[in-house]
Image: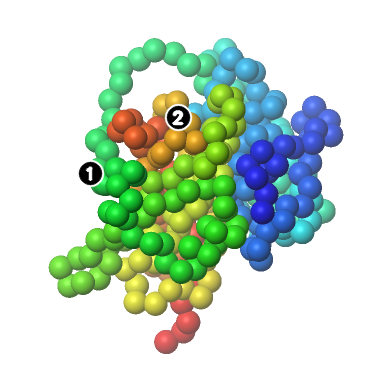
Amino acid sequence: MPRLHDVLALQRLTDDVFRSPAMPTLLKHTFGGQLVGQALAAALRTAPRSLVPHSLHGYFLQPGLPRRPTELHVERLHDGRSFATRHVTTRQDERQVFSLSVSFQRTEPGPDAQETMPSVPDPDDVDAFSPPPPVLARLLREEWPDWELRMVPRRRTADGTPQARGQYWMRHREPLADVPALHICGLAYLSDLTLLGTAALPHPSPPVMAASLDHCLWLLRPFRVDEWLLYDQISPSSGNGRGLAQGRFFDRTGRLVAMVAQEGLLRWPPR
């Protein structure tokens, strides 16, 4: 399966157009995190180096076809002294499959405050973790072998129903270069993994169809994806064939480094 470097190694066709070849995968459709990570990588290559991305908002327009190459078209919406904005459209042939807007900011000092990291076992306390569900375990082994995941045991409500909450320690198994853009795009890639499934946890049977509809990511503080990050996920609502999930990334010291929100399509068999 593709390595992170390969996923993000875009070929530049013009100043604002990039190409990615087809990537080997076991998935029927292109992994959403791949679309997010690649679009962010394209935006980064057109932005001033003095600015860093702080927020991105994307829409999954059509299923990506993993055996087709993609083209990424960047539109430079704004360039200012403190902020810049890019819009990226990912295309396969004549199909638009993904759309991403990215805002960049010049780093500046200011007051600092954050939520406290939830109490969970340390990632080195391997006996404290649950094995992932069989389907997820197989995908991690075969589709994402470069990523390590440790699942905090799931909690239940008073009546025994699983809470709509998932908690995972995650990291890239091999050390990565000290290149901030690589870690930022790596987190964008990683942030789509396991998130939507949180919305299905309270229901007695898994959905027969699940697909990401949109994806938002806020980058709050520096981090590395080759070091342990806690992905704390909740789903405040599911209904009308959709599920809403939110996530927070904390580093091992308790710093809140990123936040995520996603709505997805969830369909169950008709009763």
**Image mark count:** 2
**Residue ID at (51%, 75%):** 208
Image-quadrant location for residue 10: top right
Hey, which quadrant is residue 185 in on the image?
Answer: top right
Task: Work out whether 198 lies above or below 77.
Answer: below
Residues packed near mark 2 inside 10 Å, few (<14), some (14 to 19) or many (20 plus): many
Tag 1, which secondary structure? loop
The residue wearing badge 2 is 223
Q: Which residue is mark 1?
A: 119
Measured as percent of width and height from the top left, residue 248 is found at 37, 42
Quarter placement of the N terminus: bottom right
Q: CA distance from mark 1 to mark 2?
A: 20 Å
Q: Earlier in the sequence, mark 1 or mark 2?
A: 1
What residue is drawn where x is 24% and y is 61%? 155
Q: Is residue 46 above or below residue 233?
A: above
Q: Indicate the position of residue 206 as horizontal and vertical percent values.
A: 43, 74
